[in-house]
Amino acid sequence: MELCDRPKNTNVRISLPAVCIVWQTAMIILFGVFIRYNEESDTHWIEQRKAKNISSDVENDFYYRYPSFQDVHVMIFVGFGFLMTFLKRYSFGAVGYNFLIASFGLQWALLMQGWFHSLDYSDGKIKIGIENMINADFCVAGCLIAYGAVLGKVSAVQLLVMTLFGITLFAVEEYIILDLIHARDAGGSMVIHTFGAYYGLSISWMLYRPNLNQSDRLQGSVYHSDVFAMIGTLFLWMFWPSFNSAVTDHGDGQHRAALNTYLALASTVLTTVAISSLFQKHGKLDMVHIQNSTLAGGVAVGTAAEFMLMPYGSLIVGFCCGIISTLGYVYLTPFMEKHLKIQDTCGIHNLHAMPGVIGGIVGAITAATATESVYGVEGLRNTFDFDGDFKDTVPTRQGGLQAAALCVAICFGVGGGILVGCILRLPIWGDPADDNCFDDEPYWELPDEEEAIPPILQYNNHMRNKDM
Amino acid sequence: MELCDRPKNTNVRISLPAVCIVWQTAMIILFGVFIRYNEESDTHWIEQRKAKNISSDVENDFYYRYPSFQDVHVMIFVGFGFLMTFLKRYSFGAVGYNFLIASFGLQWALLMQGWFHSLDYSDGKIKIGIENMINADFCVAGCLIAYGAVLGKVSAVQLLVMTLFGITLFAVEEYIILDLIHARDAGGSMVIHTFGAYYGLSISWMLYRPNLNQSDRLQGSVYHSDVFAMIGTLFLWMFWPSFNSAVTDHGDGQHRAALNTYLALASTVLTTVAISSLFQKHGKLDMVHIQNSTLAGGVAVGTAAEFMLMPYGSLIVGFCCGIISTLGYVYLTPFMEKHLKIQDTCGIHNLHAMPGVIGGIVGAITAATATESVYGVEGLRNTFDFDGDFKDTVPTRQGGLQAAALCVAICFGVGGGILVGCILRLPIWGDPADDNCFDDEPYWELPDEEEAIPPILQYNNHMRNKDM
Amino acid sequence: MELCDRPKNTNVRISLPAVCIVWQTAMIILFGVFIRYNEESDTHWIEQRKAKNISSDVENDFYYRYPSFQDVHVMIFVGFGFLMTFLKRYSFGAVGYNFLIASFGLQWALLMQGWFHSLDYSDGKIKIGIENMINADFCVAGCLIAYGAVLGKVSAVQLLVMTLFGITLFAVEEYIILDLIHARDAGGSMVIHTFGAYYGLSISWMLYRPNLNQSDRLQGSVYHSDVFAMIGTLFLWMFWPSFNSAVTDHGDGQHRAALNTYLALASTVLTTVAISSLFQKHGKLDMVHIQNSTLAGGVAVGTAAEFMLMPYGSLIVGFCCGIISTLGYVYLTPFMEKHLKIQDTCGIHNLHAMPGVIGGIVGAITAATATESVYGVEGLRNTFDFDGDFKDTVPTRQGGLQAAALCVAICFGVGGGILVGCILRLPIWGDPADDNCFDDEPYWELPDEEEAIPPILQYNNHMRNKDM
């Protein structure tokens, strides 16, 4: 039997509990010191409401954003989690570690983003509510994207470290892009997807495993695991309109962002199918493409979803991204592994990096070409937030700012990834050996092998054994 | 090994990409010419709001309908998609083709329904918003129902053709029923389910395969595929209240439609279980019934959900439909296959056709018996939309209109299905041979056979082989 | 072949259909006599709205609560249903019986809760709307929790009986706790979880099977069934904020409850992982813990979610519950089975009973320490509903009331469970033999064995057989 001892270093019995307990304790202390309810989630709301002459409870931001929040929440935990279950023997790790790092990440994100965006200078506290919850989930999304690149090759402790730094970098990057540069990025094409993807790819590059082919037998899918992965794909796909509209302006902003995303995603599905069929023998479809490239349109329309991209504009963006993303899986992923030494388990370069960059560019162009005749005077100011320090910004300049933001996202992703990759190369994190990758066995109690036979087969085996 | 060449005609390497690219390009052009944002999703909303003295952003229809839209969206993609994964070896096709045709269908539906319902005559543009998105999803539902009848027996290209014509017929039928006849059909018992089911059944009749038993080995389920199918069942069942209430009147209309549907569905589950148990040896339950007949109540309450059907009325409708639908699976499906030459893979006749017709009749009766004492003067006018050209309609007349609408739906379904069935019999669409039906193999890259063994079994096989 | 006849007593061909049909008929009659639409779901709403000068349709409670309702609905049917699919050969029973008893339970709950809470004394009718639908789902949750303790060991008829009495007891207990004692319990830590868990555990104790080890071969999971169970876990986890906030006060109440639950659950995940890893050989994680203990925080924060628990308070509650719940699985479940003769299939003592009690205690402490300086004068009155007969209640007294409520919940659970357990021991309910537990075979038509082999394996078996 192969139940021989595994290499020692995958034992995380000390490090994993230690990290979880210590970090969670730190969260409690920091939350105790810094975090309080905001006006709308505090019991004083009823008094505030009267004082501010707000006519109805329905004006509480909760009712504008909670349905979108729940959809985003599903994307983070079921969407990302199940999308990664496609490997034949890494479903526990996919969905379980996704669960773990998202749960830690959202707490750390509430703090990090809170310090930058929600600090009440009157008392030094961060005041949180529904919008912070959505933004924390967004922040986590960046780290989950990065997880896709290293899926199956790292330990839970490494993932937690990666998340700690990822969230930190994200919050700084986001602050620079949204507040200092004053770019708009509703669905996070740049802030979330471009950053997250390059962060993950750089880490994967730093952790390059020349002998990963020793795990080849485990690097594919099985029939059922591909169906599980489709659960992830579909929940991401269906709720992406909520993702891109969750923090846009009330009213037409949310309405338009949802509509644009809905259209872009529909268009992507058709071109993904077309290219997938065109590049396979006999025109057969490849589940890898269907599971991933169909989502590229949602990524690419993230920045411009709240702009007047126009319905046909959304379709065009989706059209192009379905093609580019699928071609990426066909040509680029093998090329990157062979020549650039970047092993990208889930192909996040095709699903998040390229579409993210495209999304940033589309956003820049759409912003630069915005006119008062299309947007209306007030609509233009409203959509691009041309007020306060930025009240004299003109669309062309805004286009430049958007482009600058894209560069910042890429730099933070690549730079941060290299830095964190160095840390993760330390031999203390319990990562698996090359022939042990893509395998739940080192980190999870698996059901007994004998018992693990689908019971329906036992009869067969039984009969066969008798025959023998 | 059986990896011999498949029959040539399942090769869709030219036709499938061509159809996808050309049709998607056509969509982009048509959207460019015709489709624009409506008032509530346009940046001018902020000005309109002030001009019209609308007090709050929350009055944007987005907030009334978006949660229902997302539920409907889940029904379309996860609900229908996973409901059809029950076949042991057609899960990729079930969920993948469902994804493809729904994505195309919703775009074409936005155009077709737009021309009939949302055309702005001042500039010749179709103005779309959240309600159009819901209606497009509804329109797609009709085609997905039809897919259920031909599941496993057609190629992706045939499905796209079927969807193109299905959406077109749907839009015309819907216009006749809702606008010309002025029938009410909130949940689409007639417009969606009756039409969709007869459309699919007629196509299946036209595509009758006398030697389909050559695929018998693949026509059943396996344990896991039945569990996957329950995901579809449950998401359809849970979100059906949103389906039936998504486009009803704001306020009590949506409230009542959701409540009636919730009750009808609960009732259906009990009678389905009863009949399923009663007609099996030893009282065992049959997953086919649980997966399908439990939904019949939602279909049947579609038309009357917004009327004063009364809570007990909803329970009665659900009660009857659970019985009828389950009996349909026991007696009618085999009868139809043997004597009427209609091969109905998913049993849509039991889940959509019969309950749809019942729903139409229930709607007609409920409308005909509506009184001012029950509805209130304003409530009656409001619920049945007795204004404009129809302000003199009386409930009894409305009952007649509802019945007429049901006939229109059946005629469009049968007639359209026969027509489209003829087209689909052309030998150019790449459909599978009789012994190749219900099999993903001709159309999908499947995981390698050797690798496809659940790894946990490899040890066993390994041991066994050594023993031998 | 082992297709020999099963013991006679699992034949439910008469009893199951009879119970379903008779009870459903009774529901129809009772609904006909008692249940009507409430003001907001009736067509008279439009007149009422004008009469009461309600400015907008959006003030209809439907819009405040429907998104939460749908989330709760998903928890009941997909969450609980799939959480219990972890057994290798009881997935049909898990998801199917869950479906059945929830569908019956919610109807009976509408009546029982209606008589206590929504009776209109002017006409003797129960008036229902969206809040009743949520409360009916809540009521059902208690019975589904109890199902977890007896999973795999009872027949559908027993489950229906258990649900009938469970709902009845629940409604009385709830009336005592919420109305007579005037305790607050937004997320039902006491009313739902404590009651439901002790109800189930007592029944399981009454139905103790000394020879259950005869089913040992079926009492574990397989790889895929654990992934299915994670679907249940995640949908429960993600939507728990909606569960705890679904019936809280409009505005800040819902907002705060969702936020507190979100935080508590995140914290629980980290400590669950820590303890799971710490207590396994090599630090491997156990899916049983990940599937269950990660939810304990949501249970424990149920009562206090609407109070000013503070974000760090929520984290602390989650922190402790993750630890306690996981330790429960490691030590307590085996102890209870061996020494207390309580066989708890899903470990509901660890997931619902202990966290529920903790939740009650946390609620009592939080209430007792509430101050006007933290809540505001109006906020305090509003949050604890200090008006009418209870307008002179002070927080310390409220703390005592909360503690009393916890005792009531435990007493009802234990007492009711023993009573119902006696009834369920009658030899007429068709329960399975000891060596037949945890098996779908006696109650479900299973896919043909030969056909049930994942087709991909057929080649292998085929080859192997040829070799032999």
Image: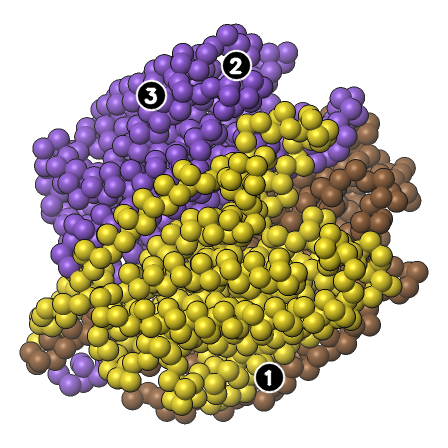
Chain colours: A yellow, B brown, C purple
Above or below residue A346? Residue C247 is above
User: Percent from the top left, x then y, of residue B417?
Assistant: 66, 68
Location of residue B6 by image quarter: bottom left
Q: Helix, strand or loop at disc 1?
A: helix
Let me know if marks 2 and 3 both belong to one chain.
Answer: yes
Query: Label 1, label 3: how many angstroms apart (C-alpha)?
Result: 64 Å
Residue at the image point whose x is 81% and y is 60% from the top:
A375
Q: Quadrant of the C terminus of chain C?
A: bottom left
Instruction: Say which residue label 1 marks.
Output: B17
Task: Name the residue carrying label 3.
Answer: C406
Q: What amino acid type should be assigned to the residue bearing mark 3?
A: Leu
Mark 3 or mark 2, which is nearer the start of the sequence? 2
2 vs 3, front mark = 2
Instruction: Give the x, y percent position of residue B378.
Output: 82, 29
Residues at badges 1 and 3 in contact (C-beta under 8 Å)? no
In the image, A416 versus A17, the foreground residue is A416
Q: What x and y, as percent, mark residue A55?
A: 72, 30
The answer to whether one can see residue A292 in this image is: no
Q: Residue at x 44, y 69 (%)?
A: A416
Q: Chain of mark 1?
A: B
Q: Distance of mark 2 from mark 1, alpha carbons?
A: 67 Å
Chain hosting mark 2: C
Q: Which residue is mark 2?
A: C386
User: Which residue sits at x=79%, y=21%?
Assistant: C51
Q: Secondary structure at mark 2?
A: loop
